[in-house]
Amino acid sequence: MKALLIWAVLLNFYKLPKTGDCASTHDQVLSIQVTTHQQADIVRNISSQYETVLWSPTSPEYIGAHTEVHLFVPANKLGTVTDLLQTHLLTHQVLLDNTEDLIEMQTRNESSDPRSSASYYERYHSLEDIYYWINKTAQDYPDMVKVTLIGSSYEKRPLYVLKLSGRQERAEKRAIWIDCGIHAREWISPAFCLWFVQYSLNFYNLNNDITEMLNSMDIYVLPVMNPDGYKYTWTTNRMWRKNRSLSKESNCVGTDLNRNFDANWCTKGASNRPCDEIYCGQFPESEPEAEAVANFLRSHKDSVKLYLSIHSYGQMLLFPYSCSNEEVPNHAELFELVQEAAMKVRRYYRNNYKYGASAKTIYLAPGGSDDWAYNLGIHYSFTFELEDRGRYGFLLPPSLISKACNEALLALKSIALRVIQKT
Ligand code: ARG
Ligand code: ZN
């Protein structure tokens, strides 16, 4: 009897830290497996409270039964959140157990650490650094790079586009457009634009693919489409997605620039509530960043044959439509292009990318730049979601930048060379 009692006490004691052991002193990212509709309601609820930030899917409305949810939870709310998960029999794993350290590493890396062997392009850079880089690159390659100002952000930061051209004169040049950094927290995206520009300039006349691309097309690159948001992720909140425009009806800040274009604007898959991550804004192109890009593309629509928007994360090569389940007229052709690109990435980098029409591959997301560009007449229009699949998500470590960029570059070249043949 006595032994039993001791056992019971011991067992209980052993159980005690159960709730405590999840209460980390660090901010974490959890992966939560939702299996029932009731659980989906619970997680939707949690994700809109407790200062959590939903990483995947982008908006609570996309959480259904059988969804894997990635959720950032601040340290002081971990106990509450994990208790709630346990109560509702929701299983979870810790994806990142200390996001503060990861963030610190990624920003410290910025000032070139003499101990690090990583190149400039294998690190993340502040907005000021990127502006400096744009200027320097234009100076170093005066015959291949022209910088134009296409507009400014809500907080009046300049939106610079680099125009890359080969040294061969051609009568009427076709063009490619690439934008990065629509969403502030997707740091690998601006890193890719820098990587791409550097690669183009260094390997022109050395690598056949890039030489052919630059000889037949001008390439417009917008490295940071959302400078206010990007700045904010460096100074204040690493998890910020939208731009930083103030709204008249609400204290919430920011519009989702990829819901602000005129393509089934603000229908299902976008939100008219300013506090939401997928807020569509007051009207199409209400945001100066979206308007600047739209104006530029409208005035270059005859030459721009290929539109490309770079995001993360998820590893996907997507094409229109996002704003409806309808198939575009050249669906089969676009499907072949992304299929071929994904096949090359699989072969060379042993990495799997999903591919297909956005609405069917991820979710309905109206008001996106890719759909809008498509409807403008740019019938080769793509959105890339770069690495990874959620292991690090938005906090992809600098050591993984080169692989993420190289494989996306391979996919880009594959698609661009086909478009050159076709147009
Ligand atoms: N994940 C991105 C988003 O939610 C891109 C989706 C693909 N394209 C689009 N137009 N929604 O905005
Ligand atoms: Zn994005």
Image: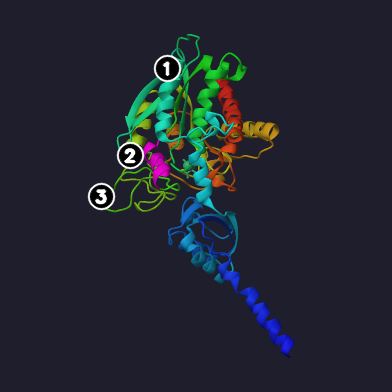
Q: Is residue 234 magenta?
A: yes
| Residue interval drawn in magenta | 225-236
Mark 1 or mark 2, which is nearer the start of the sequence? 1
Q: Position of residue 20 (x, y in %)?
A: 56, 68
Task: Decide if residue 280 is on the left or right side of residue 401.
Answer: left
Other residues around mark 2 within 10 Å, as few (<14) / some (14–19) / many (≥20): many
Task: Decide if residue 49 is on the left or right side of residue 390.
Answer: left
From where the camera sits, is residue 394 visible?
A: no
Q: Nearer the viewer, residue 341 or 20?
A: 20
Disc 3 on helix, strand or loop? Answer: loop
Q: Position of residue 311 (x, y in %)?
A: 50, 39
Mark 1 or mark 3, which is nearer the start of the sequence? 1
List the single residue furthest toward the left: 248
From where the camera sits, is residue 36 visible?
A: yes
Query: Disc 1 marks which residue?
Result: 139
SS majority, magenta: helix
User: Can you say whether 276 is above or below 348 in the image?
Assistant: below
Q: Amino acid at mark 2?
A: Glu
Q: Is residue 268 magenta?
A: no
List the single residue furthest toward the bottom: 1
Looking at the rendering, in which quadrant would you find the N terminus? bottom right
Disc 1 under 8 Å from ligand 2? The reply is no
User: Can you say whether 383 is above or below 198 in the image?
Assistant: below
Disc 1 on helix, strand or loop? Answer: helix
Query: Disc 3 marks which residue?
Result: 248
Q: Quick check: marks 2 and 1 in contact, CB under 8 Å?
A: no
Q: Nearer the viewer, residue 137 or 174?
A: 137
Other residues around mark 1 within 10 Å, as few (<14) / some (14–19) / many (≥20): some
Residue 287 is labelled as 2
Using the numbered discs, state the Cα–Cα distance from disc 3 to disc 1 in whole angstroms.
42 Å
Task: Decide if residue 404 is on the left or right side of residue 350.
Answer: left
